[in-house]
């Protein structure tokens, strides 16, 4: 039996453990992937800290996975050994529940398959993924380049393209972390007048380099008041992890504006009077499916959007995770397996 390295979380709030396990065999409908790179997302804290209901431990985190198909289970027609593939947050769906029958696979209630949460993810040399949750990866992107696009990329890209904003309208991207730095690039490449909002003056040159037309330092200025000086945002893409900070930008929406919530904050304060007076909306957004990942990767190749990464070998997972959680990473942290 072949053996592999894997990083497991033994229990909620437990340390990362680098362990040796048997390389798993693909079951019917699944594919085995030889992992080359896996991004570290802030949402991996759900697994690390036990914040998601029903996680079974030990669990291997990771939902920004890029690798090569290594073996396929029975009944898998689309994937063949040697193909370059990626796995994101949405790991697959059952295909026969009421939601799937309507084509709304992301709302599948019967089998909520989430990589790194409900099944083992990509912090390992190999992983098993449901065939319908896998995306093809274009040759133009290296594995560390493509990995963050499987969650940070798809979430911001898919949210923006479904936000209702039109070319030339004001789109603010709140937060310049793993998600936000990609959000700024996508917003700019999609033709929106893009406003980056982050803490501190030091992020301004990077925001402008990534394509922001304007920058607001939320520590030195009132971000809502500054947005209103531009006429108010059609869309605010809220990627921050802090509830008060997110609440503080909501007042910067324009007439018919939408606050698109991506950051998993525990609560949010928005003025109902403001919402009803200016016909504004608050909406959540949740990554996307394999086809959305393929669209994200294709758009990134087409438009030159790339993740700025700090790359760590798998063995340094604890340092890499702490670096992401510190907020100091510029901007995404990616593990490589040396495969
Ligand atoms: N909806 C989805 O499908 C989805 C997908 C992936 C991730 N997420 C969630 O999106 C969020 C961002 O993930 P990420 O991987 O991009 O995280 P990250 O790289 O750690 O970035 C965190 C961001 O939060 C901001 N922030 C943190 N503390 C703050 C504070 N006290 N005040 C103001 N801003 C603060 C930082 O702002 P500055 O730039 O100003 O430093 C930074 O931009 C997380 O909640 C994650 O769970 C959601
Ligand atoms: Zn994620």
Image: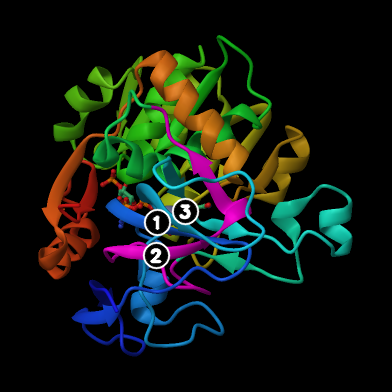
Front residue (pair 339, 278): 339
**Which quadrant of the view contains residue 149?**
top left
Residue 127 got which mark?
Answer: 2
Drawn side of residue 7 relative to residue 129, left or right: left
Label 1 lies in ligand 2 vicinity (Cβ under 8 Å): no
Residue on which the image places disc 1: 33
**Of marks 2 and 1, which one's residue comes earlier in the chain?**
1
Query: Start and end of the magenta stretch?
Result: 116-138
Alpha carbon distance from label 2 to label 1: 5 Å
Residue 189 visible in the current orientation: yes
Front residue (pair 339, 161): 339
Alpha carbon distance from label 2 to label 3: 27 Å
Picture coordinates of residue 277, whole percent (x, y): 76, 36
Drawn side of residue 246 relative to residue 41, left or right: right
Tell me the SS state at disc 3: loop
Residue 269 visible in the current orientation: no
Q: Residue at x 54, y 65 (%)?
A: 114
Picture coordinates of residue 233, whole percent (x, y): 55, 26
Whether the residues at callouts 2 and 1 have beta carbons within 8 Å, the answer is yes
Residue on which the image places disc 3: 263
Ligand 2 positioned in quadrant: bottom left
Alpha carbon distance from label 1 to label 3: 29 Å
Picture coordinates of residue 118, whole percent (x, y): 53, 74
**Of marks 2 and 3, which one's residue comes earlier in the chain?**
2
Drawn side of residue 128 relative to residue 27, left or right: left
Q: Residue at x 62, y 63 (%)?
A: 74
Q: Which residue is drawn at 63% across and 54% down?
A: 76
């Amino acid at each position: 039996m072949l053996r592999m390295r894997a990083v497991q979380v033994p229990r909620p709030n437990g340390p990362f453990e680098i362990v040796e396990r048997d390389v798993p065999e693909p079951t019917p409908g699944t594919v085995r992937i030889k992992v080359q790179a896996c991004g570290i997302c802030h949402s991996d804290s759900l697994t690390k800290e036990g914040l998601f209901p029903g996680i079974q431990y030990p669990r291997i985190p990771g939902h920004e996975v890029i690798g090569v198909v290594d073996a396929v289970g029975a009944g898998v027609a689309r994937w063949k050994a040697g193909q370059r593939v990626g796995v994101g947050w949405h790991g697959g769906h059952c295909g026969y529940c009421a939601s799937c029958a309507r084509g709304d696979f992301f709302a599948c209630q019967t089998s909520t398959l989430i990589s790194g949460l409900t099944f083992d993810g990509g912090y390992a040399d190999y992983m098993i993924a449901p065939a319908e949750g896998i995306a093809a990866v274009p040759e133009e992107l290296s594995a560390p380049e493509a990995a963050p696009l499987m969650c940070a990329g798809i979430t911001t890209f898919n949210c923006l393209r479904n936000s209702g904003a039109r070319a030339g309208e004001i789109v603010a991207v709140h937060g310049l972390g793993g998600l936000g730095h990609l959000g700024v690039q996508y917003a700019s490449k999609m033709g929106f007048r893009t406003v980056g909002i982050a803490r501190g003056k030091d992020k301004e040159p990077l925001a402008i380099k990534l394509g922001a037309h304007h920058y607001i330092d939320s520590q030195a200025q009132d971000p809502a008041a500054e947005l209103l000086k531009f006429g108010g945002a059609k869309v605010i893409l809220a990627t921050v992890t802090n509830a008060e900070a997110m609440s503080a930008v909501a007042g910067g929406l324009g007439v018919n504006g939408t606050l698109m919530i991506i950051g998993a904050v525990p609560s949010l304060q928005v003025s109902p009077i403001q919402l009803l007076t200016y016909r504004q909306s608050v909406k959540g957004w949740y990554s996307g499916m394999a086809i959305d990942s393929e669209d994200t990767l294709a758009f990134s190749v087409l438009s030159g959007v790339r993740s700025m990464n700090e790359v760590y070998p798998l063995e340094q997972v604890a340092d890499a995770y702490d670096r992401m959680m510190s907020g100091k990473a510029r901007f995404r942290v990616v593990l490589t397996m040396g495969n």
